[in-house]
Amino acid sequence: MKPEKTLESNVRSILELLGEDPEREGLKDTPKRNARALQFLTSGYQADFDKIVGRGVFQQDSSDIVIVRDIELFSLCEHHLLPFFGKAHVAYIPNGKIIGLSKIPRIVDAYARRLQVQERLTSQISNHLMELLKPQGVAVIIESLHLCMMMRGVEKQSSTTVTSSMLGVFRDDARSRQELLSLLGGLGSTHGGRR
Ligand code: ZN
């Protein structure tokens, strides 16, 4: 059976096990819709980074900090298969190569559309950019809300989880890190709260 069909029949079983009637009108197409949604939300496993980045990397002599902030992010927590969502802020200091700015959110999506923990997602993005651009430094900061905490009432409803991954000069040089945090404004006080 095709994976999509197997997913569908398993979703149907879940509905039954939850005491629902998968044949009632509202649920009739739910297994199909849920299977498709799950496949989309985990499509990052098939991401082709050569295709995503394409010819989006350029030679450029610049050592000025580049920041793409407030990148919308949606992912699934691997412990509960429930969404976590928020914003990613990505910064780097070039070392001869720059990347088209629109590529960075696409790299974020490629790693977010998987079963994740926020910590790993954060470092996968920073490591990817480090490898791709060999920059002087990369910083990735993610702030997000986890529905597995919010809906289950595990923690305060509005508590945000912040993770950061600093590589190169952002890790080694306090002045670069300070410059970044002041450019990012209000994030400075909480960065690194959970690594
Ligand atoms: Zn969770």
Image (cartoon, rainbow, N blue to C red):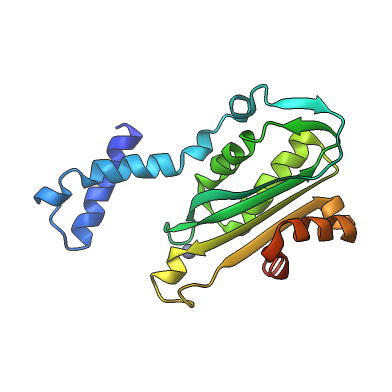
x then y, percent, for residue 178: 83, 61
Residue closest to the eye, 4 or 113: 113
x then y, percent, for residue 152: 39, 72
182 vs 46, left or right, is right
Instruction: Please name the residue shown 74% across and 34% down the image.
Output: 132
Give the answer, above or below, for where 110 lies relative to 21: above
Which quarter of the picture shows residue 40? top left
Which quarter of the picture shows residue 147? bottom left
User: Quadrant location of the C terminus?
Assistant: bottom right
Q: Is residue 186 visible?
A: yes
x then y, percent, for residue 52: 59, 29
Q: Is residue 23 visible?
A: no
Instruction: Please name the residue shown 77% across and 60% down the image.
Output: 182
Q: Which residue reaches farthest left? A: 24
Give the answer, above or below, for where 178 lies relative to 193: above
40 vs 172, left or right, is left
x then y, percent, for residue 141: 67, 56
143 vs 29, left or right, is right
Q: Which residue reaches farthest top? A: 55
Instruction: Please name the residue shown 89% across and 59% down the image.
Output: 175
User: Quadrant location of the N terminus?
Assistant: top left
Residue closest to the eye, 182 or 28: 182
39 vs 13, left or right, is right
Count of labels shown?
0
Residue closest to the eye, 90 or 117: 90
Instruction: Please name the residue shown 52% across and 38% down the image.
Output: 45
Which quarter of the picture shows residue 20? bottom left
